[in-house]
Image (tube, rainbow, N blue to C red):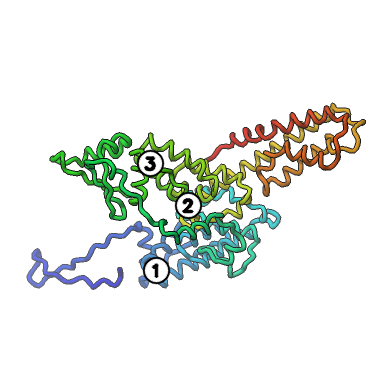
Amino acid sequence: MFQLPQPDLIPNPATSDSGSTIVRPVIDVSEDSATLDTLLRLVYPVKNPELVDIASIEPVLEAAIKYDMEWPTELATERLLAVVPESPLQVWAIGCRMGLEIVARRGAEALLATIPEFQRKERVLLPDIIHDLDGMEGIFAGDYWRLLSFIRHSGQGGDDFHFLKMASSIKDNMAVLGPLDEVRLLLQDLPFHDHLPSDPADDVPLADIVCRCADEETVLAHRSILSLHSSVIAARIRASRSVDRHQRVILDFEESRSTLCGLLSLCYGVGGTLPHDPTSLVSLLAAGKKYRMSQVLPMLESQWESVSTREPFVSYCLTAKEGLVGPARVAGRKAVQDESTALPGQWYTPHMEDMSARAYHQLLDYYAACRGVLDNALLKAKIEWDATAKGMNVKEIKHTTMAPSWMSTHLERLRSQMDEAPSKYRNCLQDVFGTSYKSSPWCRKSDDIIHAIFKFTSRLPDAIEAAQDEVEWIW
């Protein structure tokens, strides 16, 4: 911008023959006047403005980086690092937004120092981060995941730990990728992997719509079929209708040919099975929601219930990125209960690098709430069982693990294991009776206790599920 040629002197007809006027070029910029004024004062030979708080430093630093102004960038960065002790989380966020590794690191290190050491390892989330960062705009889930990993490991990793990109060493040590990643790579080598579906309208003559896709491919369709399934597309057809009714209407779509063909196949009632790949299915769900295809969406949502079970966290990320709240909640609930990646520190997928940190935080917040409910439910169950056991006659029961105290101990064990095995309570009935009988034969005089334990463990899973269903998902 500052390499533009100097303005020319152009004669001004309103003045004398020797008079001239300067015609200054007009440059539109996105920064506000206060930011631009501060930036220019940094480069002009005048006293530098004071940059003492985050609110004044961030926009100036962003503008300096945007216009490739080296000295103002260095000065604004220096001022930003000076306020790290007062605003560590905000400094980390600015470093992530602007791609400044050293800034993100200094903010994270200062934030770590504010967290007591005994609270770091079990840190699931930063409770007030959405409020403190004004909605977490411009922060990605991958950034937030790395910050939490840094906290949980008390800063171990040193300079090899990267806050802005996924280093292979960090990924190998701290993340568990989706179990189907290798399968997807193998599928890409198969000859039919990139095969595009045919036009659903091929089997129906007299197509009168040309659908032009985002990848410049075209798909033929019929006005009547599209209008029947989508009021949104019907309105576009009416607005685009030409004078000649026999001339094909051309409609532009933002979806790829593969997605549009899959969607139209459902409208036409052809095309075989629905996709089992989460990415493809999410594309169809997003398009179906966008075009309000109420007859198609139930089929897609039913398929999603099945597909999201295999990789619930990956499925959550895909739907959250598309803003599909309902399907995201379905996948999120399954992710919280998924024992293959039960701990949030193990939740990682490359999809997090372009998913908002806010969506990731919402899932972590839901996870923490569900764990709190599960812990309270198991504690309440133990209290209820201890109260029930007080009225039992256990003096004549010998050599058996069916004593009331054993059941109480088992409930305590479930509480201690709920992070690694959050769904273990579902097998409570089987675990209790299988373990107890294997340990020692049941005493004939323990029938009352056996009946009480059977009744108690039979209804325990449903009671816990009901309590977790009441957890509010804040979106």
Residue sitting at x 64%, y 65%: 156
**Which numbered disc covers residue 356?**
2
| Residue 224 image offset from top left, x and y in percent | 26, 36
Question: Considering the numbered disc 1 on the image, is that residue within a helix, a strand or a loop?
Answer: helix
Identity of the amino acid at label 1? Leu
Residue 238 shows in the view: yes
Q: Which residue is mark 1?
A: 42
Tell me, for residue 280, which label it has, or none: none
Query: In the image, what residue occupies the spot 45% across and 70% down?
Result: 74
The reply, left or right, for residue 117 in relation to residue 102 is right
Task: Give the left or right position of residue 175, taking residue 246 as reference.
Answer: right
The quarter holding residue 33 reads bottom left
Q: Quadrant of the N terminus?
A: bottom left
**x and y, in percent, of residue 416 in the image:** 73, 46
Q: How far apart are the two marked residues, 1 and 3, measured between alpha carbons?
A: 52 Å
Label 1 environment density (alpha carbons within 10 Å; few <14, some 14–19, many ≥20): many
Asked if the residue at tag 2 contacts the one at tag 3, i.e. Cβ–Cβ closer than 8 Å, the answer is no
**Please, what secondary structure does the residue beneath circle 2 have?**
loop
- Can residue 82 be seen? no
Of the image marks 3 and 2, the number of the one nearer the N terminus: 3
Q: Which mark is residue 288?
A: 3
Which comes sooner in the sequence, label 1 or label 3? 1
Residue at screen point 28% across, 48% down: 219
Total count of labels = 3
**Callout 3 amino acid:** Gly
Which amino acid type corresponds to the residue marked 2 in the rendered image? Ser
* Number of the front mark, 1 or 2: 2
Q: Residues within 10 Å of mark 2 (few under 14, many from 20)?
A: many
